[in-house]
Amino acid sequence: MSFNRLEADDFVVSADSITAGIFTDSQIPEITTFFTSSTQRTSNSGDYYLNVFSNAATSSLEFAVTYGNELGSGSAAYNLDVDGKSPSSTVYGQYRTLVLGDENADFTFGSITSSDFWAVSMERSRYKESIFPGSTTLLLRGPDGVISLTDNSQVASSVVFNDAGRVFQLVSGSAGTVFTTLESNGYSIDSGSYGLFLPDIATYILNPRALSNDEADGGIGLDATLTSALTATDSPNLNTIFTAITHSNASSFTANSEETITSDFVFVRPRSSQFNYSENPSFISGSTGEVLYPSFINAPTTYITTVGLYNDTNELLAVAKLSKPLEKDFTKEALVRVKLDF
């Protein structure tokens, strides 16, 4: 076995971004049908969130919707003698810790601070690393009409970061294309943006204040009156956002996942004087160690089939197989490129 130490310039690192549809059928980045589970609705978890599926068989979990309120409004209290402690306050605290990393911080939409929000969180198995900025189109319907939401990643002058990673504003638009009028671009002075887009945790934080405005103010009048499918056990706030997303005349959610594939290229260079002899039994005698064929003494020929990468203690770390044997003798040099993806 022959060894050759690799130098620093034998390594090259490359990173490529790969995108795909985020939903069950990754070839199609859009879903237009939405279902919930009646069992989950009536369970304890139904007080906190609703799982949303893309087919009635509830086998394709796509995302979950939830409602958070700092004061605990919008859901029944755990204990009637303790104000402000309910599923909505728990959700608010969880997302505040996850997104803001500070239990005393508040959610800010544009320039407006809000004490509540709706959240749409993608199922973890649906995306590799993050949501691809500029790929989102989310249609919401209220009594005043339909609004199409996207993120402002394509027009933002700089990227803002918090504990959840990158932060973009949700604005009126489609697939990263932002509409231009004051009301429809999602930056109302009185209500702030339509929400936050957090691609690195695949979450959308929706601003109820902006969405509850009427059409003249750039909103859709989204409020708790959207309870056509409400049952006695449902949370009005959860049902409101679910109904807005799944309305039969405006049901479309489009997004792509994004994954950065890092490749380490290792260039192995057998020089003319190297790797021309072999310890293979077809080359030398196993009993005497002599070269089997006299012509191989001064003019050997070997065939490279495998490249092994070792550390300094001779531990095998990776193996690369060539597609076909590579002929090698004193008159030939070779360059083998090994690609490691991780």
Image (spheres, helix red, strand yellow):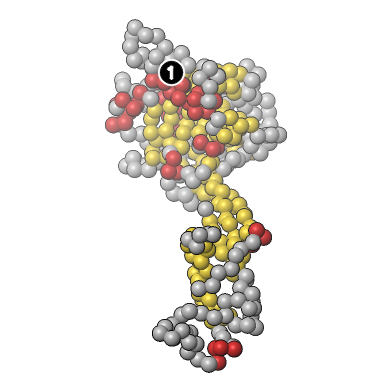
At x 43%, y 18%, the residue is 89
Q: Position of residue 292 (x, y in %)?
A: 47, 89
At x 60%, y 60%, the residue is 265
At x 57%, y 52%, the residue is 262
Q: Position of residue 310 (x, y in %)?
A: 52, 62
For label 1, the crowd category at 10 Å Cα-Cα, with few meaning under 14, some 14 to 19 and many 20 or more, is many
- In the rendered image of this protein, does residue 202 appear above or below residue 43? below
Q: Could you say which quadrant of the image residue 58 lies in?
A: top left
Residue position for label 1: 89
Say whether residue 139 is visible. Answer: no
Q: Nearer the viewer, residue 225 or 333?
A: 333
Q: Could you say which quadrant of the image residue 246 lies in?
A: top left
Residue furthest front in the image: 288
At x 39%, y 40%, the residue is 61
Q: Mark 1: which amino acid?
A: Ser
Is residue 22 toward the left or the right of residue 6 in the image?
left
Considering the numbered disc 1 on the image, is that residue within a helix, a strand or a loop? Answer: helix
